[in-house]
Amino acid sequence: MDMLIVLNNYLHDVATASLLASAVIFYVLARQARDGDAGEKRAFARAYKSLTRFATGALVWIILGGIPRTIFFTKYEFIPAQMNGIVPDLIMKHVILVAMVIAGVVMWVRMGKLAREYRGSES
């Protein structure tokens, strides 16, 4: 059981990084599309749907993986941090993780609006 909780916590962090990384990559693609021709804008709009599946998967894992992480937080994260004198580091880590999730979601929402705009300009 210990190994599963620790593995969940690591995968939860990976999902958070994946969400933000995919949003940053998609942001770069959006900038290229903005500066490109109509074909690049259409390609960006078409890619949005499939790339969003990846980001949605990461967000689902963040939510679902957060449940056991929260339940076992004291045993697997807080007490070890307390014993090692790194509670401030643990707090900062979670502040950064929350900021990463928020930034990733905000970026995806903005890119979605842009993709719909580019899709609408096809006609």
Image (cartoon, rainbow, N blue to C red):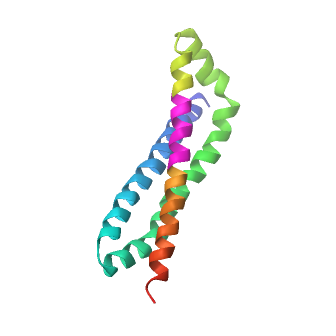
> Residue 76 placed where, x, y %?
60, 24
Compared to 32, does 25 lie above or below?
above
Residue at (31, 65) in percent of width and height: 32
Compared to 90, does 57 lie above or below?
below
> Residue 8 placed where, x, y %?
56, 38
| Residue that protrudes farthest toward the bottom in the picture | 123
Q: Identify the image quadrant of the N terminus.
A: top right
Asked if residue 101 lies in the magenta stretch, the reply is yes
Could you say which quadrant of the image residue 23 lies in? bottom left
Could you say which quadrant of the image residue 34 lies in? bottom left
Q: Main secondary structure of the magenta part?
A: helix
Residue at (63, 34) in percent of width and height: 69
> How many labels were placed on the picture?
0
State whether residue 31 appears in this view: yes
Residue at (46, 69) in percent of width and height: 48
Q: Which of these two is toward me, 102 or 36? A: 36
Asked if residue 13 lies in the magenta stretch, the reply is no
Residue at (65, 21) in percent of width and height: 75
Compared to 93, does 68 lie above or below?
below
> Residue 87 placed where, x, y %?
56, 16
Residues rendered magenta in the picture? 93-103
Q: Which of these two is toward me, 93 or 12? A: 93
| Residue that protrudes farthest toward the right in the picture | 71
> Residue 80 placed where, x, y %?
57, 16
Compared to 9, does 86 lie above or below?
above
Q: Which of these two is toward me, 17 or 83? A: 17
State whether residue 7 appears in this view: no
User: In the rendered view, does 67 fall on the left or right side of 109?
Assistant: right
